[in-house]
Amino acid sequence: MILTWIGHSCFRLEGKDVSLLIDPFSKEIGLKPPRIKDNLVLLTHRHYDHASIDDVDSETMVIDGPGEYESHGVYVHGISSFHDNSGGTERGLNTIYVIKLEEVTICHLGDLGQEKLDEQQLELIGNIDVLLIPVGGKYTIDYKQAVAVVGQIEPKVIVPMHHKLPDLKIEGLDGVEKFLKEMGLTPEKLDKLKVTPKTLPQEEIKLVTLSL
Protein backbone atom coordinates (compact mmCIF):
# COMPACT_ATOMS: atom_id res chain seq x y z
CA MET A 1 0.00 0.00 0.00
CA ILE A 2 1.28 3.46 -0.95
CA LEU A 3 0.07 6.57 0.88
CA THR A 4 0.49 9.99 -0.75
CA TRP A 5 -0.39 13.31 0.89
CA ILE A 6 -2.09 15.74 -1.49
CA GLY A 7 -2.29 18.48 1.16
CA HIS A 8 -4.55 19.56 4.05
CA SER A 9 -6.54 16.37 4.92
CA CYS A 10 -6.41 14.85 1.44
CA PHE A 11 -4.60 11.55 0.90
CA ARG A 12 -4.46 8.99 -1.87
CA LEU A 13 -4.14 5.31 -0.93
CA GLU A 14 -3.00 2.99 -3.67
CA GLY A 15 -3.01 -0.77 -3.72
CA LYS A 16 -2.09 -3.12 -6.53
CA ASP A 17 -5.48 -2.84 -8.25
CA VAL A 18 -7.28 -0.01 -6.46
CA SER A 19 -6.96 3.69 -5.67
CA LEU A 20 -8.79 5.55 -2.92
CA LEU A 21 -8.96 9.32 -2.31
CA ILE A 22 -9.90 10.95 1.00
CA ASP A 23 -11.20 14.53 1.44
CA PRO A 24 -10.47 16.16 -1.95
CA PHE A 25 -10.40 19.96 -1.60
CA SER A 26 -11.24 22.84 -3.94
CA LYS A 27 -8.65 25.23 -5.37
CA GLU A 28 -10.09 27.96 -3.13
CA ILE A 29 -7.89 26.81 -0.24
CA GLY A 30 -4.73 27.80 -2.16
CA LEU A 31 -3.34 24.33 -2.83
CA LYS A 32 -3.42 22.38 -6.09
CA PRO A 33 -6.47 20.13 -5.93
CA PRO A 34 -6.22 16.46 -6.88
CA ARG A 35 -7.55 15.15 -10.16
CA ILE A 36 -10.03 12.50 -9.15
CA LYS A 37 -9.10 9.26 -10.92
CA ASP A 38 -9.87 6.85 -8.12
CA ASN A 39 -12.13 3.85 -7.54
CA LEU A 40 -13.35 5.20 -4.21
CA VAL A 41 -13.66 8.70 -2.74
CA LEU A 42 -14.26 9.21 0.98
CA LEU A 43 -15.66 12.43 2.43
CA THR A 44 -15.36 13.06 6.18
CA HIS A 45 -17.76 16.04 6.03
CA ARG A 46 -19.23 18.42 3.47
CA HIS A 47 -17.02 21.51 3.83
CA TYR A 48 -15.39 22.94 0.70
CA ASP A 49 -11.90 22.07 1.92
CA HIS A 50 -12.83 18.38 2.29
CA ALA A 51 -15.52 17.55 -0.27
CA SER A 52 -14.81 18.92 -3.73
CA ILE A 53 -16.18 16.23 -6.05
CA ASP A 54 -17.53 18.19 -9.03
CA ASP A 55 -15.33 16.23 -11.45
CA VAL A 56 -15.92 12.79 -9.95
CA ASP A 57 -16.51 10.01 -12.48
CA SER A 58 -19.87 8.21 -12.47
CA GLU A 59 -18.06 4.91 -11.92
CA THR A 60 -16.33 6.17 -8.76
CA MET A 61 -17.89 5.06 -5.49
CA VAL A 62 -18.39 8.05 -3.18
CA ILE A 63 -18.62 7.26 0.54
CA ASP A 64 -20.10 10.09 2.55
CA GLY A 65 -20.82 9.15 6.15
CA PRO A 66 -20.98 6.37 8.75
CA GLY A 67 -21.53 2.75 7.79
CA GLU A 68 -19.69 -0.29 6.48
CA TYR A 69 -18.68 -0.47 2.83
CA GLU A 70 -16.73 -2.84 0.62
CA SER A 71 -15.56 -2.30 -2.95
CA HIS A 72 -12.59 -3.37 -5.10
CA GLY A 73 -11.25 -5.46 -2.23
CA VAL A 74 -11.20 -2.48 0.16
CA TYR A 75 -13.16 -2.51 3.42
CA VAL A 76 -14.24 0.88 4.79
CA HIS A 77 -15.94 1.57 8.11
CA GLY A 78 -17.27 5.09 8.70
CA ILE A 79 -17.66 6.03 12.37
CA SER A 80 -19.66 9.04 13.55
CA SER A 81 -17.86 11.74 15.55
CA PHE A 82 -18.10 15.47 16.24
CA HIS A 83 -16.39 18.34 14.40
CA ASP A 84 -16.18 20.27 17.68
CA ASN A 85 -15.99 19.62 21.40
CA SER A 86 -19.62 20.66 21.98
CA GLY A 87 -21.47 17.64 20.63
CA GLY A 88 -21.57 19.01 17.10
CA THR A 89 -23.48 22.19 18.02
CA GLU A 90 -20.79 24.44 16.51
CA ARG A 91 -19.57 22.66 13.38
CA GLY A 92 -21.70 19.53 13.07
CA LEU A 93 -20.67 15.95 12.48
CA ASN A 94 -17.48 14.36 11.19
CA THR A 95 -16.86 10.83 9.95
CA ILE A 96 -13.82 8.86 11.04
CA TYR A 97 -12.83 6.24 8.48
CA VAL A 98 -11.12 2.93 9.17
CA ILE A 99 -9.81 1.46 5.92
CA LYS A 100 -8.43 -2.04 5.40
CA LEU A 101 -6.31 -2.30 2.27
CA GLU A 102 -3.83 -5.09 1.49
CA GLU A 103 -3.69 -6.26 5.12
CA VAL A 104 -2.90 -2.74 6.39
CA THR A 105 -5.43 -0.84 8.54
CA ILE A 106 -5.52 2.94 8.15
CA CYS A 107 -7.55 5.40 10.23
CA HIS A 108 -8.34 8.89 8.91
CA LEU A 109 -9.79 11.06 11.70
CA GLY A 110 -11.11 13.79 9.40
CA ASP A 111 -11.82 17.07 11.17
CA LEU A 112 -12.10 15.52 14.60
CA GLY A 113 -12.99 18.19 17.15
CA GLN A 114 -13.54 16.03 20.22
CA GLU A 115 -10.83 16.33 22.85
CA LYS A 116 -11.20 12.61 23.50
CA LEU A 117 -12.71 9.67 21.69
CA ASP A 118 -15.38 7.84 23.66
CA GLU A 119 -15.26 4.12 24.47
CA GLN A 120 -17.63 3.14 21.69
CA GLN A 121 -15.63 5.04 19.07
CA LEU A 122 -12.39 3.47 20.28
CA GLU A 123 -13.92 0.00 20.13
CA LEU A 124 -15.14 0.58 16.57
CA ILE A 125 -11.75 2.00 15.51
CA GLY A 126 -9.89 -1.01 16.90
CA ASN A 127 -6.24 -1.77 16.16
CA ILE A 128 -4.72 0.73 13.75
CA ASP A 129 -1.51 0.46 11.74
CA VAL A 130 -1.42 3.98 10.25
CA LEU A 131 -3.17 6.97 11.86
CA LEU A 132 -3.84 10.17 9.87
CA ILE A 133 -4.51 12.83 12.49
CA PRO A 134 -5.33 16.57 12.41
CA VAL A 135 -2.96 18.66 14.55
CA GLY A 136 -3.52 22.33 13.59
CA GLY A 137 -6.25 23.31 16.03
CA LYS A 138 -8.97 25.98 15.59
CA TYR A 139 -11.28 23.79 13.45
CA THR A 140 -10.04 20.47 14.87
CA ILE A 141 -8.17 19.14 17.89
CA ASP A 142 -4.94 21.00 18.56
CA TYR A 143 -1.45 19.54 18.87
CA LYS A 144 -1.78 18.69 22.58
CA GLN A 145 -5.17 17.05 22.12
CA ALA A 146 -3.79 15.19 19.11
CA VAL A 147 -1.05 13.67 21.24
CA ALA A 148 -3.71 12.52 23.73
CA VAL A 149 -5.78 10.92 20.95
CA VAL A 150 -2.65 9.14 19.67
CA GLY A 151 -2.33 7.73 23.18
CA GLN A 152 -5.91 6.48 23.04
CA ILE A 153 -5.57 4.76 19.65
CA GLU A 154 -1.94 3.57 19.98
CA PRO A 155 -1.20 3.20 16.25
CA LYS A 156 2.04 1.88 14.82
CA VAL A 157 2.59 4.83 12.45
CA ILE A 158 1.41 8.46 12.82
CA VAL A 159 1.02 10.92 9.95
CA PRO A 160 -0.02 14.48 10.91
CA MET A 161 -2.36 16.50 8.68
CA HIS A 162 -4.63 19.57 8.66
CA HIS A 163 -2.01 22.09 9.79
CA LYS A 164 -0.52 25.34 8.53
CA LEU A 165 1.14 25.29 5.10
CA PRO A 166 2.85 28.12 3.16
CA ASP A 167 0.18 28.41 0.42
CA LEU A 168 -2.85 27.39 2.47
CA LYS A 169 -5.44 30.17 2.66
CA ILE A 170 -7.16 28.78 5.77
CA GLU A 171 -6.11 31.05 8.62
CA GLY A 172 -5.42 30.27 12.25
CA LEU A 173 -3.89 26.80 12.03
CA ASP A 174 -0.75 25.89 13.95
CA GLY A 175 2.23 24.49 12.10
CA VAL A 176 3.13 20.82 12.41
CA GLU A 177 6.23 21.68 14.48
CA LYS A 178 4.24 22.05 17.72
CA PHE A 179 2.85 18.54 17.36
CA LEU A 180 6.26 17.07 16.54
CA LYS A 181 7.78 18.72 19.62
CA GLU A 182 4.92 17.57 21.86
CA MET A 183 5.24 13.98 20.59
CA GLY A 184 8.96 14.01 21.38
CA LEU A 185 9.79 11.77 18.41
CA THR A 186 12.09 12.45 15.48
CA PRO A 187 9.96 12.22 12.34
CA GLU A 188 10.93 10.33 9.24
CA LYS A 189 10.47 12.70 6.29
CA LEU A 190 9.15 10.99 3.16
CA ASP A 191 7.62 11.84 -0.21
CA LYS A 192 5.34 8.81 0.02
CA LEU A 193 4.72 6.19 2.68
CA LYS A 194 4.98 2.60 1.49
CA VAL A 195 3.55 0.10 3.96
CA THR A 196 3.19 -3.66 4.12
CA PRO A 197 2.43 -5.80 7.19
CA LYS A 198 6.09 -6.82 7.27
CA THR A 199 7.44 -3.24 7.27
CA LEU A 200 5.23 -1.97 10.11
CA PRO A 201 7.09 -1.19 13.35
CA GLN A 202 6.46 -3.82 16.01
CA GLU A 203 7.42 -1.98 19.18
CA GLU A 204 7.94 1.79 19.08
CA ILE A 205 5.56 4.22 17.37
CA LYS A 206 6.89 5.66 14.12
CA LEU A 207 6.21 9.32 13.26
CA VAL A 208 6.19 10.24 9.56
CA THR A 209 5.84 13.62 7.89
CA LEU A 210 4.97 13.63 4.19
CA SER A 211 5.97 16.32 1.72
CA LEU A 212 3.73 17.74 -0.99
Image (tube, rainbow, N blue to C red):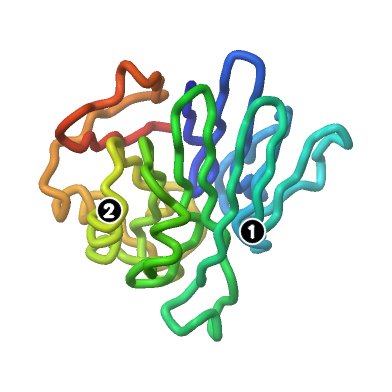
Residue 142 as seen in the image, left or right of residue 10: left
Quickly name the residue at label 2. 150
Q: Which residue lies furthest to the left in this view?
A: 184
Q: What element carries label 2?
A: helix
Above/below status of 69 relative to 39:
below
Mark 1 or mark 2: which is in front? 1
Where is residue 199? Give x, y as percent.
30, 18
Sequence-wise first label, 1 or 2? 1
Amino acid type of the residue that numbered disc 1 sits on in the rendered structure = Pro
Residue 16 is situated, as x and y percent measured from the top left of the image, at: 59, 14
Mark 1, secondary structure of its residue: loop
Q: Quadrant of residue 89?
A: bottom right
User: In x, y percent, where is residue 98?
Assistant: 51, 45
Quadrant (top left/top right/bottom left/bottom right) for the C terminus: top left
Q: Disc 2 residue type? A: Val
x then y, percent, for residue 91? 56, 77
Figure check: 70 above or below 194: below
The vertical placement of 77 against 103, above or below, is: below
Tell which of 96 and 185 is nearer to you.
96
The residue at which mark 1 appears reads as 66
